[in-house]
Image (cartoon, rainbow, N blue to C red):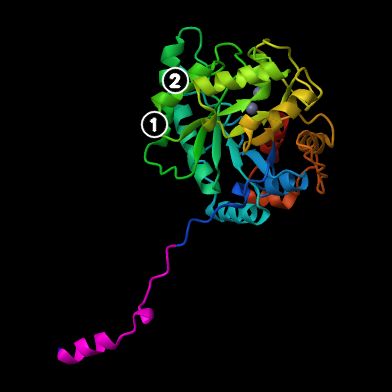
Amino acid sequence: MAEEQRIDLLFDASDEYRPEPPQPPEIPAWKDGSQRIGIHTSIAGDICGALELAQGLGATALQIFSASPRMWTRGTGRIAEADASRFRARRKALGLGPLVIHDSYLINLASGNPVLRARSVQAFHQELVRSLALGADFLVAHPGCCGADRGIRDSIHAVAQGIRQAARGLKLGELQILLENTAGQGTSVGSKFEELRAIIDACAGLPVGVCIDTAHLFASGWDIRRSEGLDATLRALDGAIGLQRIPVVHCNDSKTPLGSRVDRHEHIGRGKIGLEAFERILNHPLLAGRAFIAETPIDKPGDDRRNVAALWKALGREVTANGADGMKPRRKKAARRSGQSRTQGKAAVKRRG
Ligand SMILES: [Zn+2]
Ligand SMILES: [Zn+2]
């Protein structure tokens, strides 16, 4: 015993073993404070192709569907882990982000039809599972439409309840669900900011925020064409929702006029909102740090490239695309490998949220 104590005394304090401090969590490249411009790209053929497309278009962020947006997925609707890990690795290598996933058009959590509702909850659960597998940052969801027989209060409750059911048992980690504001078409929920806020409040404990779509804002009556109108809109958003809850902005010009309540996207600068308005939106100090993502139509080859370039130009940057644009058909081999039909992909190209 005495021997051991003497050894202790001879021990130099500087030799003391100090465990390495725990490594801080790795900060993804897209959170480096640089400006993030993205576009919705197709997963047709091979899901990793969406990453190559986005990068080739000069985008630094992207949005995708994680399955066909017009078909109910069969079985579990899962992505094979080999494909998901390949996707995560490639995205990391390209430094693309945030990765936004848009949910299926078929999902309607506000539906009063019990069969459609049950399917929607299940499909939204699958959306969350796929988003987690792909390492997505955000899952954008349309709140849904309630039908004439149902009041807005019941619909808000139904949407929130549906999200909670779908998320049950899942560890969402860094993934955030973003409710998208709607144009106010028909009985759609979520064209009023207060409705989005009410859903968020009813989802307490879950990471739920908002994605604002410029075309939907305009169609629902917010005149964002001029400086005063944009300021008033942002004030209203801040008051009702809180701008810190809005990390993503869908940048779409509008084919339809102010207050039309009709959702028709147009190329940046070619619609009723106009280029100057987009310059103000992208440079607005209250929107600093947001990811701006285009969901513009593809009418002819080069449209995606031009829309991405237009958003960069609004930020005062000249960015030239170096890759193929969204019109080029993907390779056949890749389509077979991922087991996804080419028609599924085509649907993904044609319409965007
Ligand atoms: Zn949108
Ligand atoms: Zn839309």
Q: Left of 151 or right of it: where is 234?
A: right
Front residue of 349/56: it is: 56
Comparing marks 2 and 1, which lies closer to the viewer? 2
Gap between marks 2 and 1 measured at Cα? 17 Å
- Residue 220, compared with residue 202, is above or below; it is above
Residue 131 drawn at (x, y percent): 53, 42
**Residue 14 covered by magenta stretch:** yes
SS type, badge 2: helix
The residue range painted magenta reads 2-22
Q: Which residue is mark 2?
A: 198
Q: Which residue is mark 1?
A: 165
Residue at (39% x, 31% y) in the render:
165
Which quadrant of the view contains residue 39? Answer: top right
Quadrant assignment for ligand 2: top right
Front residue of 216/150: it is: 216
SS type, badge 1: helix
Question: Would residue 188 be seen by someone viewing this image from the given angle?
Answer: yes
Tag 1: amino acid: Gln
Tag 2: amino acid: Ala
Image quadrant where one finds the C terminus:
top right
User: Seen from this angle, which residue lies furthest bottom?
Assistant: 3
Residue at (73% x, 43% y) in the render:
59
Task: Determine whether the beta carbon of the residue marked 2 sits less than 8 angstroms from the nearest atom of ligand 1.
Answer: no
- Residue 20, compared with residue 212, is above or below; it is below
Residue at (64% x, 12% y) in the render:
221
